[in-house]
Image (cartoon, rainbow, N blue to C red):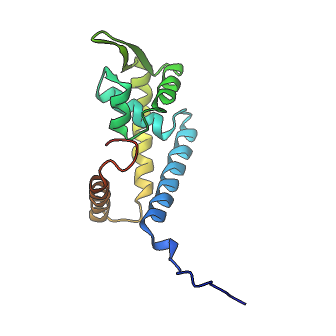
Amino acid sequence: MLVNFGVEFLPVSSLPGHLARRFHQLSTALFDVEMQRSGIDLTPVQYAALAAIFAKPEIDQASLAGLIGYDRTTIGGVVDRLCDKGFVARSTNPGDRRAKVLVATPAGAAILERANEIVRAAQEQLVAGLDPSERKQLVQLLEKAITALGDVSRTSR
């Protein structure tokens, strides 16, 4: 006997949040598989952080967290791992002795160059079922939805 207790059925498979979570799972899985296949030890967040540090040398950790949409309290662990791997150097900001600034090392630049090609390939796989105009539209719609939400999370864009 099927009883629904008067609860409304929500078709989870068509909810934007559920679809975003599934898309993120697939993106992460593709990233991980391709990085492992290439022998590169980077997580998606480490890659994002390294790319941001490379693009903005001497960025501080708080700004880095905001730039990649990551929690300020946990970005330190990501940076620690990048420093431990020799991909990032951290030093004291001469203008504010309490702040640390980050720069990519030559090893970090080399791994980023290798990883960029892998990330491009993984991203292509992620949207392989879409034609070029749909790919562009997907990115535009995701950007629009994220911008419309502002700073709902504990991170900033």
In the rendered image of this protein, does residue 68 appear above or below residue 96?
below
**Which is nearer the eye, 59 or 138?**
59
* Residue name at image x 30 percent, y 22 percent: 57
Q: Can residue 22 be seen in this view?
A: yes
Q: Quadrant of residue 41?
A: top right
Rendered-image quadrant of the N terminus: bottom right
Residue 121 at x, y = what percent? Answer: 42, 48
Q: Can residue 113 be seen in this view?
A: no
Residue 2 at x, y = what percent? Answer: 68, 88
**Which is nearer the eye, 75 or 23?**
75
Furthest residue in direction front, as rendered: 6
* Residue name at image x 51 percent, y 50 percent: 30
Residue 34 at x, y = what percent? Answer: 52, 44
In the rendered image of this protein, does residue 126 appear above or below residue 10?
above
* Residue name at image x 44 percent, y 38 percent: 71
Rendered-image quadrant of the C terminus: top left
In the rendered image of this protein, does residue 101 appear above or below residue 32?
above
Q: Quadrant of residue 61?
A: top left
